Amino acid sequence: MTDPARPSKRSGTKYHSLARLPPTTPIRHTYALWQCRRGQKPRRESRPPRCSRRPFHRGPPSPDASHAPDRRILLAVGRLDSQKGFDRLIDVFSELTRTHQDWDLVILGEGPERRALESQILSTHLSARVILPGRAGNVGEWYERADLYVMTSRFEGFPNALAEAMAQGLPAVSFDCNTGPREIIRHDVDGLLVPPGDTVGLKVALDRLMGNSVLRAQFATRAMEARERFSMERIARMWEALFGALRH
């Protein structure tokens, strides 16, 4: 006689339960999770996650869930490491919070500097104003929700996130580091460039745009031109022109 508490391939009980899990869940974890739900102790070799009533997979952080509609967002995106200069950004933002009380700073990304940045946020008493959501597969939603983009890198190659943010209509403020920002931002047209490492200049530039919604809207309209400026077709034509010039 078949034990009704034990799943079998023929009955399909186990597979019916597991079918409700996300398709990306590892097989060994799905079986272990099924055992937890049945009150059974998982086998050691399955290395299951801790049994919990919470969902096994948490969705990406949502800007609408974490910020009220009346809050404005200063957005930065990148790996949490020293290259991106987020330590300098947090210091500068801490000096702007009193003047711009309706603004929050969101830094999307993950990396080895998370603990140091979290400690910095605590020491500056900005836990309610500076958010580190981690990695986000829905970066486009954050671009749409944000009001201003900022980049404080010590150096760059070609900063894709900056180009993507501007293509979504975000005005930008960036250190004019080597290389990339000057090729993307047109100073006083769709954003502001600040001399590399000039934190006082960064504060002035952010203050100017955070406090002027009309100027932000003007820059945002021109920022969307990045869609054409960095489109695949335009870049391909530039390469063709270069190769043609080299042949002659």
Image (spheres, rainbow, N blue to C red):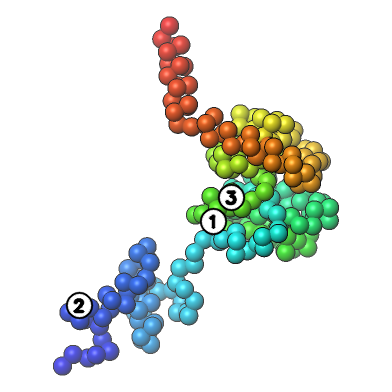
Residue 23's x, y, as percent?
35, 64
Picture quarter containing residue 225?
A: top right
Picture quarter containing residue 114?
A: bottom right
Q: Alpha-carbon distance for marks 1 and 3?
A: 17 Å
Q: Which three-letter amino acid code belongs to the residue tagged 3?
A: Glu
The front one of 192 and 120 is 192
Dot placed on the residue nearer the N-terminal end, 1 or 3: 1
Q: Which residue is mark 1?
A: 135
Is 216 rendered above or below residue 48?
above
- Residue lying at 60% horizontally and 64% vertically, measured from the top left: 65
Q: Which residue is mark 2?
A: 9
Dot placed on the residue nearer the N-terminal end, 1 or 2: 2
Residue 213's x, y, as percent?
74, 45
Instruction: Using the rendered image of the protein, determine whether residue 94 is visible from the camera's viewpoint.
Output: yes
Q: Can you name the residue that lies furthest to the top here? A: 248
Q: Quadrant of the N terminus?
A: bottom left
Q: Which three-letter amino acid code belongs to the residue tagged 2?
A: Lys
Q: Alpha-carbon distance for marks 3 and 2?
A: 47 Å
Q: Which residue is mark 3?
A: 144
